[in-house]
Image (spheres, rainbow, N blue to C red):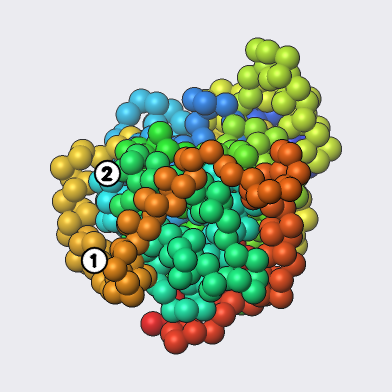
Amino acid sequence: MPEARAASAALPQPALEIASGYAFGGPALDLGALLWDGVCLPDAQVRIPLPMLNRHGLVAGATGTGKTKTLQLVAEQLSAQGVPVFLADIKGDVSGISAPGTRNEKVQARAAEVHQEWAATGFPAEFYALGGIGHGIPVRATVTSFGPVLLSKVLQLNQTQEQSLGLIFHYADQKGLELLDLKDLRAVVAFLTSDEGKAELKNIGGLSTATAGVILRSLTAFEAQGMADFFGEPEFDTAELLRTASDGRGMVSVLELAAVQDRPQLFSTFLMWLLADLFHDLPEVGDADKPKLVFFFDEAHLLFNGASKAFLDSITQTVRLIRSKGVGVFFVTQTPKDVPADVLGQLGNRIQHALRAFTPDDQKALKATVKTFPESAYGLEELLTGLGTGEAVVTVLSEKGAPTPVAATRLRAPESLMGPVEPGTLDSAVRSSPLYGRYAQAVDRESAYEKLSSRGAKGPDEMADEVADEVKAPARKPKGAPAGKPEDDPSVVEQVVGSGVFKSLARSLGTQIGREITRSLFGTARRRR
């Protein structure tokens, strides 16, 4: 201890003031060593208090600056302290967290620079894949559980169509028509536009043939892209993400997305479903000694692109409230401007890697990023463009919840493998998991499609084809209708949105039927088993 105090006293005064802001007494994650005037000061360690990890965070930086390795570094230490972690693996290079790293000259040099006692270590991990596409235990959601708001974003529906889809879900909830997969939803849409079904929604506005046709075409296109496998049973239970290993370390859940990285609308919205489902199910815990789960939301800009105001409001509220349920959320993207201001304002922990300033847009983004940091002893514009790979500007929340001083940091090296494990090793890990038998085989039990098929001579597929054919035909205006008036009359939508039934749905009060269905901020649902 006397040697440590002497080393601290030898620091330059500005560096000493910064270092004192990271001298936490309780459990913390070690990020690296302070950089000052281009020199690494290993006696000035930069850390994040463990209890503050549920106050959310942002990991940002240009491509190739080391964001993925930072996620790996933080995930390792969380796991070591008994905190489960969720990681979305977009490029397929995070699977190495399950295997010990390789000691080489670069790792040894980095460890020496930051006074890290590096030891090759693998961490307990489960590997998942959306719909089983790729290497991993299949992750599926039922259409009922996914809900109308998230599904509308995946199908790229407009506000009117989203509202109509919400009405369809409400009807299915009320009538006990289980929407397990996409054919169930197609069947209900087709039924509600049939002669028999139109009367079902008569008192709350009905469903126009034009809107039904758009929804059905979107579903057909969605299925044609091979995306139907993501919906169905067995549905993934997000409580699996909260597990710890037998040795007490937190389980690292890695969702492999490399096979579906060309479908950003789908996987980004699916990540939001996982988070919304956790929010829906977890009890309030208040401020805990450590988080129940830390959830890393990679490629976060994809979630916000083209999002409606209602969708953004739901994200903001989910992020704000899930903290009290013990879940920390870290958004991972290139610049803070990718994240809406209302969400960014809730991210107390910041790890900002280097930014580029090659174009006027880059320079504008750089200036905007600097403004999001507290006052600093650094010249941040120059610093952020000069950081090397594996270096970052850090500010976190102290144990008292106040922002720490801005600290340029040379980050530690991950102790697990920095790269993917072999495909054969990955497949073996997946098949030996106790969860594989639970989720591997898709099942198709009786649901809305089968129930509606048994009601009449015309099956749901035939009714859906008739709706699609009708929509393709030129629209016929009633006699005396004003020229140019669209078939999808706004007054119908206003009637639907203004009805007491739809307002109840929007307020997420849910509907009690047979087995309980409740809907949360995003209209997501979980059937209580």
Give residue 280's position: percent from left, percent from top.
Answer: 55, 71
Residue with the mark numbered 1: 443
- Three-letter code for the amino acid on which mark 2 is drawn: Gly
In percent of the image, x 28 and y 46: which residue is there? 133
Residues 315 and 256: in front is 315
**Of the residues tagged 1 and 2, which is closer to the observer?**
1
Give residue 418's position: percent from left, percent from top.
Answer: 36, 36
Left of 113 or right of it: where is 57? right
Q: Is residue 338 above or below residue 216?
A: above
Q: Is residue 297 visible?
A: no
Residues 373 and 13: in front is 373
In percent of the image, x 65 and y 36: which residue is there? 338
In percent of the image, x 29 and y 74: which residue is there? 454
Give residue 501's position: percent from left, percent from top.
Answer: 66, 75
Quarter of the rendering containing residue 170: bottom right
Residue with the mark numbered 2: 134
Left of 22 or right of it: where is 31? left
For the C terminus, the quadrant is bottom left
Classify mark 2: helix, strand or loop: loop
